[in-house]
Amino acid sequence: MEIHILSVLPELMESPFNHSILKRAKEKGLAKIILHNIRDYSSDRHKSVDDYAFGGGAGMVMMIDPILSCIESIQAEGPVDEIIYMTPDGERFNQKAANQLSTLNRVIILCGHYKGVDERLREHIITREISVGDYVLSGGELAAAVVVDAVIRLIPGVLNDETSALTDSFQDDLLAPPVYTRPAEYRGWKVPDILLSGNSGAIEKWRHEQSVLRTKQRRPDLLDES
Ligand code: ADE
């Protein structure tokens, strides 16, 4: 999967993708993340990427031309499956959307800044708008990093144990069950006996029960959705 990220602050995006699972995905050639500085596509001598809003009001608006030039240069190299704009008024991101996106080959993610992008880009060019939650970040970069992380770990071969993404919270609209490691007892706090029993059928059943219980207690809305 090839992910192109368009930003006015590409430096902000370098670190999240250079560690752990995402780094391994890149090294294995399963994910390629290409950062583009929108400013490099500005045609004026000041390299401007934003301008005042028509009609007045505080805050600058990101201009169409540098963004569209960047998008078109990516499209010139091959088809793009989705052009995503990170924005708090987009569809709320969830595991289902992550699963869907992980099946795509080439995507563009546009990170907004200031008051946002010129609406005409959203009308004519953007194919999907995603929010990571009902709060406003200073820019779309951290939101894009969240989406890219959630998507890349789902690409087959990225996680060592193929089943481990399937048992994540939300994968079947259930939260994950509690997990424990050694020692079996610490300051009198004991690991549930069932997990030490060696009875894999009983353990699986217990985990499922715990998942359902936890979901009922913490996120009953997930049970309503399924
Ligand atoms: N940009 C600013 N806030 C955001 C949010 N909550 N989700 C996605 N992009 C954003």
Image: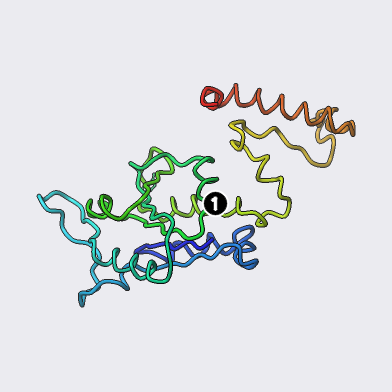
* Residue lying farthest to the bottom in this orientation: 45
Q: Does the numbered disc 1 mark a residue whose Cβ is under 8 Å from ligand 1?
A: no
Quadrant location, the N terminus: bottom right
Q: What residue occupies the far front of the structure in this picture? A: 79
- Tell me if residue 127 comes above or below residue 71 in the rendering: above
The residue located at (61%, 38%) in the rendering is 171
Residue 31 in which image quadrant: bottom right
User: Who's the residue at 49% across and 50% down the image?
Assistant: 147
Q: Residues within 10 Å of mark 1 (few under 14, many from 20)?
A: some
Horizontal and vertical percent position of residue 114: 27, 54
Residue 218 at x, y = what percent?
57, 26
- The total of numbered circles placed on residues is 1
Q: Residue at x 63, y 57 (%)?
A: 21
**Image position of 9 (left or right of 181):** left
Q: Position of residue 174 (x, y in %)?
A: 61, 31
- Residue at 35% x, 47% y: name it: 87
Q: How is the image coloured?
A: rainbow
Q: Amino acid at mark 1?
A: Ser
Where residue 68 appears, as percent x and y from the top left, is 29, 64
Q: Which residue is mark 1?
A: 102
Q: Is residue 34 left or right of residue 153?
A: left
Quadrant in the picture for residue 217 = top right
Is the C terminus in the top left, top right, bottom left or bottom right quadrant? top right
Callout 1 secondary element: loop
Q: In this picture, is 5 found above or below 147?
A: below
Q: Nearer the viewer, residue 21 or 72?
A: 72
Residue farthest to the right, as pictured: 198
